[in-house]
Image (tube, helix red, strand yellow):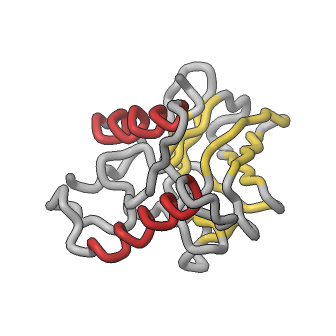
């Protein structure tokens, strides 16, 4: 899908969220491949990396190898003044912006749910999100778009964070 220049609703993001919810079923796993596809093709050319990520989940889930098999998964949000602190599972040996750039594709909103692009930074194993446009934030979204091209939050094992939202 085409890039969205403003935060908004996304059927693709809703579908990804439905896939993420299947992790509540025992003995399931998921490999995030949002960074491996092309904007104009649902089937990524880079099937090798998709397969390797799926193999990592199998090694962990089925063969009980003690490896980081997933990228960061949203766990909880805490509002502190004009910022929201996000916690994750599967941080592995730490969080990183994979490209060395500021974290991208984070959006924030107040109680009106009018999302604007936000600034975000890694602080330890958490991500802090804020925007001067939203003095009383309530909600955060990450990579909530049909084609999120600036989603660069990963763990140090090189696995991408799953898109998420806190406004469910």
Point out the residue furthest to the front here. Answer: 63
For image coordinates 35% across by 69% down, the residue present is 51
Look at the image and tell me whether residue 103 can be seen. no
For image coordinates 48% across by 61% down, the residue present is 151
- Percent x, y of residue 118: 59, 49
**Relative to 114, is 93 on the left or the right?**
right
Look at the image and tell me whether residue 68 can be seen. yes
- Percent x, y of residue 147: 31, 54
Q: Does 26 appear above or below 87?
A: above
**Relative to 137, is 25 on the left or the right?**
left
Q: Does 41 appear above or below 80?
A: below
Number of marks present in the image shown? 0
Point out the residue furthest to the left here. Answer: 40
In this rendered view, identify the residue nearer to me: 10 or 45. 45
- Percent x, y of residue 10: 32, 37
State which quadrant residue 64 falls in. Answer: bottom right
Q: Does 154 appear above or below 144?
A: below
For image coordinates 52% across by 47% down, the residue present is 142
- Percent x, y of residue 4: 31, 50
State which quadrant residue 166 falls in. Answer: top right
In this rendered view, identify the residue nearer to me: 60 or 18. 60
């Amino acid at each position: 899908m085409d890039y969205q220049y403003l935060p908004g609703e996304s059927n693709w993001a809703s579908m990804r969220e439905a896939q993420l919810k299947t992790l509540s079923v025992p003995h399931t796993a998921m490999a995030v491949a949002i960074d491996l596809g092309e904007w104009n093709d649902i089937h990524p050319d880079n099937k090798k990396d998709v397969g390797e990520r799926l193999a990592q989940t199998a090694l962990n889930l089925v063969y009980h190898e003690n490896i980081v098999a997933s990228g960061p998964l949203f766990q909880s949000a805490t509002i502190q003044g004009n910022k929201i602190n996000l916690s994750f599972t599967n941080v592995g040996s730490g969080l990183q912006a994979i490209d060395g750039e500021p974290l991208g594709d984070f959006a924030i909103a107040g109680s009106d749910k009018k999302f604007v692009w936000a600034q975000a930074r890694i602080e330890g194993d958490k991500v802090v999100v804020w925007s001067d446009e939203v003095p009383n934030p309530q909600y955060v979204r990450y990579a909530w778009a049909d084609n999120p091209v600036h989603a660069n939050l990963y763990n140090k094992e090189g696995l991408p964070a799953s898109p998420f939202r806190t406004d469910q």
